[in-house]
Amino acid sequence: MQTEQELVATCLALIDGQGRLSAIERRLARTASALNPRGIAAICKAISRGADPLGEAFSSIRSAAVRRSAGAVYTPEPIVRSMMTWLAGQGMPDRVVDPGAGSGRFILAAGEVFPNAQLVAVEMDPLAALMLRANLSARGWTDRSTLLVKDYREAKLPRCAGMTAFIGNPPYVRHHDIAEGWKAWYASAFADFGIRASALAGLHLHFFLQTRLLAKVGDVGAFITSAEWMDVNYGSALRRLLLDELGGIALHMLEPTVEAFPGTATTAAITCFRVGETAEPVRVRAVAELECLNGLTNGTDIPRERLHATPRWSTIVRPSELATGDIELGELFRVHRGQVTGANDIWIAGEHAKSLPDRVKLPAVTKARDLIQAGANLLSAEVLRRVIDLPAELDDFTKNERRCISVFLSWAKHHGADQGYIARHRKAWWSVGLKAPAPILCTYMARRPPQFTLNVCDARHINIAHGLYPRQPMADGVMVRLVTWLNKNIDRGSGRTYAGGLTKFEPKEVERLRIPSLEALLA
């Protein structure tokens, strides 16, 4: 199977009239190419053994970038198996629901573990739904399964007298690609629980919410998602929902090395819940190797009250132990993100700023690459771009300088530089207000650990970097040794790793980094 048409044809051959296709699946079926019947029996046999040849073909036909944009990143079998082992320990469900089923890895595993349970799969992508229908048909489970080809947030489930289990890998789609109507639904539904929710939440958080709306007290579930919601501000709504409504009882954080989502270097979290649970502690742990999942039974019990009081849950799941004499970086430095220009194409100097006085064009770090390429020492400002930083008051310029500045400001205003949110909230819209040079700079977001760099040339920095400002004068050699130590010892695990593989370090997270004492650095 090398094309989508061949994949569709293979699925139709496996279904062979069993099960009724949805209208959208029928439209897709019309694109099927002529089928080469060879290999269908082998594919059917592989599916019966628990393999996923259709999902693997789908993952090779559609590029990783296309699949990521739709949240179609399929879960490796060992993680599926561990989550199913945990679920089996919660009792025998009458119904199992997979809200973002894909090719059906979770729902097919559930069919094996719970032979008497009804299987409900929800999948929006018609090709994935067709693959899932083919997989269910190959297993002979068409009669005990229901496939809803729709958005999970629109799904309705009939009442179930017994326990319903929810399990799966909700799709990761960033808030930029979520319609405003769904954002309003998200905020309104959370408000009904007395919880304030942010429109910046990704689609996977919508799935947690919809699960709570569909579930009843006593239902259980386990979802694997990107772990960013554990720390970011917009994740606070989900954190409270888990503690007060959805009944979170376990949280297993998987390091990027585990590769929960193939093709991405992302910290993942497996969240286990029992709807209505509000008293039991939450079992938490960090998992560094796939072999350590062990059915999701290990961990440390944390009182719910402590989780309620903690804004960043990763610090509880993966606490940093201070060695004797160690300190936090924030005891020595204040950390500030660089200034936001509001419009880099205006305020980063180019031909449009050629006539401006040199003294208002300040060398600045404007790209993370500036620091990464410099390494431990930023020695020269010659390689840096200049940022235009005019003062709020323009009285100290010569007549000729004022004339050049007026021409530039007219040009900038013509291009809307005075209309942006940042510009409208400045004392003077033309005054960027760069911060003073920081002795140490570090990158803010990258697919790598942060780069710490001594700012030997006193460059300024905009908001792609952080500046480290000493709280008190430092002895000679301290900052040199500190930068060396930070670059050798700080890894991505100290920040927030997002589903695209980017790791972010907010200023307070940099201040919380554990470092040796001054005495140890100078020893």
Image: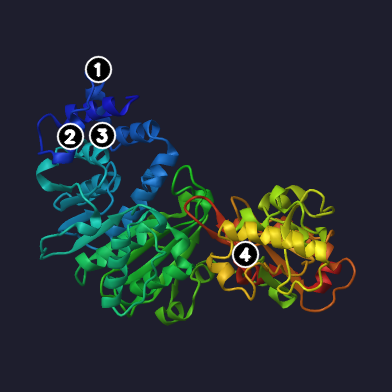
The secondary element bearing badge 4 is classed as loop
The residue at which mark 4 appears reads as: 340
Instruction: Kindly report which numbered mark, 1 or 4, lies closer to the viewer in this rendering.
Output: 4
Instruction: Kindly report which numbered mark, 2 or 1, lies closer to the viewer in this rendering.
Output: 2
**Viewer-proximal residue among 509 and 272:** 509
Residue at mark 4 to residue at mark 2: CA–CA distance: 49 Å
The residue at which mark 1 appears reads as: 38
The residue at which mark 3 appears reads as: 47
Report the residue at 85% width, 77% height from top. 473
Instruction: Kindly report which numbered mark, 2 or 3, lies closer to the viewer in this rendering.
Output: 2
Q: Position of residue 448 (x, y in %)?
A: 62, 51
Residue at mark 3 to residue at mark 1: CA–CA distance: 16 Å
Q: Amino acid at mark 3?
A: Ile
For marks 2 and 3 on the same chain, the one whose residue lies earlier in the sequence: 2
Report the residue at 26% width, 46% height from top. 109
Instruction: Kindly report which numbered mark, 3 or 4, lies closer to the viewer in this rendering.
Output: 4
The residue at which mark 2 appears reads as: 27
**Viewer-proximal residue among 512 and 461:** 461
Instruction: Kindly report which numbered mark, 3 or 1, lies closer to the viewer in this rendering.
Output: 1
Q: Residues within 10 Å of mark 3 (few under 14, many from 20)?
A: many
Q: Residues within 10 Å of mark 4 (few under 14, many from 20)?
A: some
